Image (tube, coloured by chain):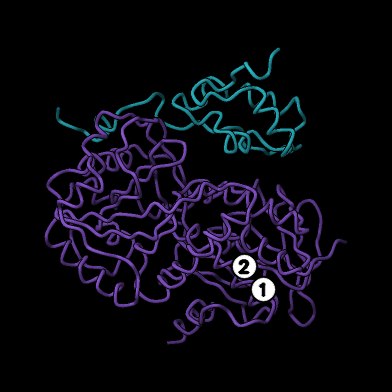
């Protein structure tokens, strides 16, 4: 597989290579991978790439922590305009 | 048993800065954190270092000094924390707000800070997407922004280069004192560390750490929700923009009632927006006492969005992609606690910065190091001494 052309996070366009490089360099949790690369922070809220990132961290031997919180789920379920949320009339 | 000159508890922005500054001083330092770096408040906040949201006096003085330190750190550090001096803009909705703002600005200007009033036309020139019926505002050039969790990573990585040991995913279970009542060791779920000095930088969780040595810290978690916009080609705000009413939501002693909906009033929501390096916008702001609960509340989401589109109508067309909440370490007098605790020699506190932790991180780290090294501090920080609460209780 070509790591440079394989996109893991489509929203933020983060490649497999960037994610692997971050895990390797910082030996870090999924959450830290997210914060450092922005993978999972785009418009789908990580719904596409979350499990891939979790698996990559697991495979590459990230920190062995039993109580690690996986990547969080945050509202809204899909993007909603500020107009709708704010009750705009028009 | 491993032994350290100083053990810092909590790897949020304050603990990371304190640990870095102590390591830079040449001390043997351990940073102990129950989760990962920046896993609490410092990754659930906004991202600015401002003077315009501080009260005149020591609050502003320290805030200003901290921004100068940020500029220096941004040059020195090899890790980028996205620091930028973009300025900030307060907007006043009514003539009445503008009058209060004028009084505030003249006080700050008298102290030598570069804050100035802008009229409604200038407001439109500075931020063209602002609603056209606003009365005016305050512009503060020195105000700056950064990425808060990258700042924590930067402090930790630069600290490591200087010999800092980081124990993340180590939960502090107990603190032991010697027969004289001085700090002796920190017990975690993964080992015990010997030390004569502890700095409690656990923010909203610092009362739990202090309880271990029988000290009561009057810090309460004050929740805040933030909405994130999608990336958009519209530069709806080119700097931090917030309504002057924000000051009213932050400081309970300012008596002024805004003309807002019941929902906005109920949830103590005041409009703020800031651009990020990733081209999203962070939209807030909200203050409430809900314990440690950081779940997103739909009513608050509605209130924040309602207030946001009132000031920036363009946002109606722009999507919100995410919402999150964090808890600020609130203290009644809105001044952080930066001092040793008299009753427990070797036990220091650097906490209670409420929403100013990012702003105040560099100067706090510097002054804690000065306290521990027995040097004079950059500022007279008697007002930040923990003993102020004892005196208040005695009265």
The residue pinned by badge 1 equals B347
Of labels 1 and 2, the one closer to you: 1
In the rendered image, which quarter contains the C terminus of chain B?
bottom left
The chain displayed cyan equals: A
Residue drawn at 42 percent across, 71 percent down: B59
Q: Say which element carries label 2.
A: helix
Residue drawn at 28 percent across, 48 percent down: B271
Chain B palette colour: purple
Residue drawn at 61 percent across, 23 percent down: A15
Residue drawn at 80 percent across, 66 percent down: B4
Image position of B331 (left or right of A84)? right
Name above or below for residue A39 compared with residue B293.
above
Confirm or deny contact between disc 1 and disc 2 (CB under 8 A): yes
Quadrant of residue A82 within the rendered picture = top left
User: Badge 2 local density, few (<14 within 10 Å), some, or many (20+)?
Assistant: many
- Residue B275 x/y as whole percent: 39, 42
């Amino acid at each position: 597989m070509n790591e440079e052309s394989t996109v893991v996070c489509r929203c933020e366009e983060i490649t497999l290579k960037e994610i692997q490089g971050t895990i390797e360099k910082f030996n870090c949790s999924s959450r830290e991978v997210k914060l450092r690369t922005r993978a999972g922070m785009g418009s789908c809220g990580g719904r596409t790439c979350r499990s891939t990132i979790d698996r990559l961290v697991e495979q590459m031997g990230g920190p062995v922590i039993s109580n690690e919180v996986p990547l969080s789920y945050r509202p809204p379920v899909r993007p909603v305009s500020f107009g709708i949320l704010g009750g705009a009339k028009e | 048993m491993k032994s350290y000159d100083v053990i810092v508890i909590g790897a949020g922005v304050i603990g990371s800065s304190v640990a870095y500054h102590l390591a830079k001083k040449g001390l043997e330092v351990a940073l102990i954190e129950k989760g990962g770096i920046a896993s609490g408040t410092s990754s659930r906040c906004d991202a600015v270092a401002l003077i315009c949201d501080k009260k005149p006096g020591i609050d502003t003085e320290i805030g200003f000094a901290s921004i100068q330190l940020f500029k220096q750190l941004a040059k020195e550090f090899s890790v980028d924390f996205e620091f930028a001096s973009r300025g900030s803009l307060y907007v006043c909705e009514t003539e009445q707000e503008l009058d209060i703002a004028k009084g505030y600005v003249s006080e700050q200007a008298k102290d030598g800070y570069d804050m100035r009033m802008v009229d409604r036309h200038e407001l439109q020139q500075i931020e063209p997407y602002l609603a056209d019926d606003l009365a005016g505002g305050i512009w503060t050039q020195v105000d700056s922004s950064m990425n808060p969790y990258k700042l924590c990573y930067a402090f930790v990585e630069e600290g490591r280069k200087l010999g800092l040991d980081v124990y993340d995913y180590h939960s502090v279970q107990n603190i032991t004192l010697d027969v004289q009542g001085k700090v002796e060791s920190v017990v975690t779920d993964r080992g015990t560390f010997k030390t004569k000095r502890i700095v409690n930088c656990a923010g909203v969780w610092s009362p739990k750490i202090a309880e271990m040595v029988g000290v009561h810290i009057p810090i309460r978690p004050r929740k805040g929700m933030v909405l994130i916009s999608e990336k958009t080609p519209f530069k709806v705000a080119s700097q931090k923009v917030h309504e002057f009413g924000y000051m009213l939501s932050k400081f309970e002693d300012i008596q002024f009632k805004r003309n807002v909906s019941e929902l906005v009033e109920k949830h103590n929501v005041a409009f703020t927006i800031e651009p990020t390096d990733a081209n999203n916008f962070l939209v807030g702001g909200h203050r409430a006492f809900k314990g440690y609960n950081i779940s997103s509340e739909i009513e608050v989401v509605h209130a924040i969005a309602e207030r946001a589109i009132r000031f920036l109508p363009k946002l109606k067309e722009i999507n919100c992609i995410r919402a999150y909440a964090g808890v600020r370490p609130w203290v009644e007098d809105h001044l952080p606690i930066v001092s040793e605790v008299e009753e427990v020699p070797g036990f220091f506190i650097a906490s209670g910065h409420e929403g100013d932790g990012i702003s105040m991180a560099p100067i706090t780290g510097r002054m804690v190091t000065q306290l521990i090294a027995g040097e004079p501090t950059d500022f007279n920080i008697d007002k930040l001494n923990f003993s102020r609460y004892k005196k208040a209780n005695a009265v």
